[in-house]
Image: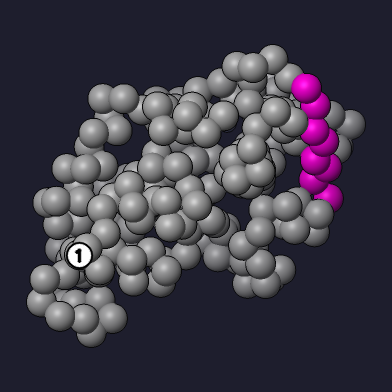
Amino acid sequence: MISVGGLAPALIFVRNFERNYIDMSGMNYITDVVEKLVNKYDTRDPFELCKALGVTIRYKDLDKYMKAYFFYQSRIKSIIINNNVADVLRRILCAHELGHAVLHCELAMMNSFQEIELFDATQPAEYEANLFAAELLIPDDELLELLNDDSKSFFGVASELYVPAELLDFKFRVLKNKGYRLEAPLLSQSNFLKNDIGGCFDNDY
Ligand SMILES: [Zn+2]
């Protein structure tokens, strides 16, 4: 194991060379797709990426429970965002829908993606869109710097990154796949989410 960023011993994050190769291919693909997009367009801003990729974004007064949706029709990719959600959440929704636009166009031809439970990890396409959003919006270096500061809690880190705790949890899965592992304190904090997923997000609605 080696330290990240050459910081002192009480590290939250360490590199684990006994990495787990199970279920890597899908996650590696998403990591590669995001990296290529960010490098090509020189931005992590999902709105700018939508513009560059020709994905239209519109805002509508949707039902309270419908946060956003994505559909693909007549070769046009469209994201609709509920105009009642706060700006900080619009960015998350845009990144998630962009994930569908990039990864799931064939599926979207049959059915639109409608976001009610945004952080659903049980449906493969939703899981992938969340991994995409987490990877796009949370750069590794920024996150590792925050995590190596042991004064910060899991929720404090999420707050500093302007993301819901649930999205940070998805990013942890990506980092684990890259060969990092979490020390116990932060991991246990993230595990609270397994019992009450969605709560933090809904408070921001
Ligand atoms: Zn979705």
* Whether residue 160 is visible: yes
Where is mark 1, residue-wise? 150
Residue plotted at (49% across, 27% down): 202
Residue plotted at (26% across, 53% down): 153
Give the quarter of the image for residue 195. Answer: top left
Residue plotted at (69% across, 36% down): 105
* Whether residue 110 is visible: no
| Towards the viewer: 171 or 154 | 154
The quarter of the rendered structure image containing the C terminus is top right
Q: Give amino acid for label 1.
A: Asp
* Mark 1 vs ligand 1: CB below 8 Å: no
Q: Residues within 10 Å of mark 1 (few under 14, many from 20)?
A: few
Report the magenta stretch's main SS. strand
State the SS at label 1.
Answer: loop
Instruction: Residue 23 in the image: state x and y as whole percent.
Output: 32, 45
Instruction: Residue 72 in the image: state x and y as whole percent.
Output: 78, 31
Q: Is residue 57 magenta?
A: yes
Q: Which residues are magenta?
A: 54-61
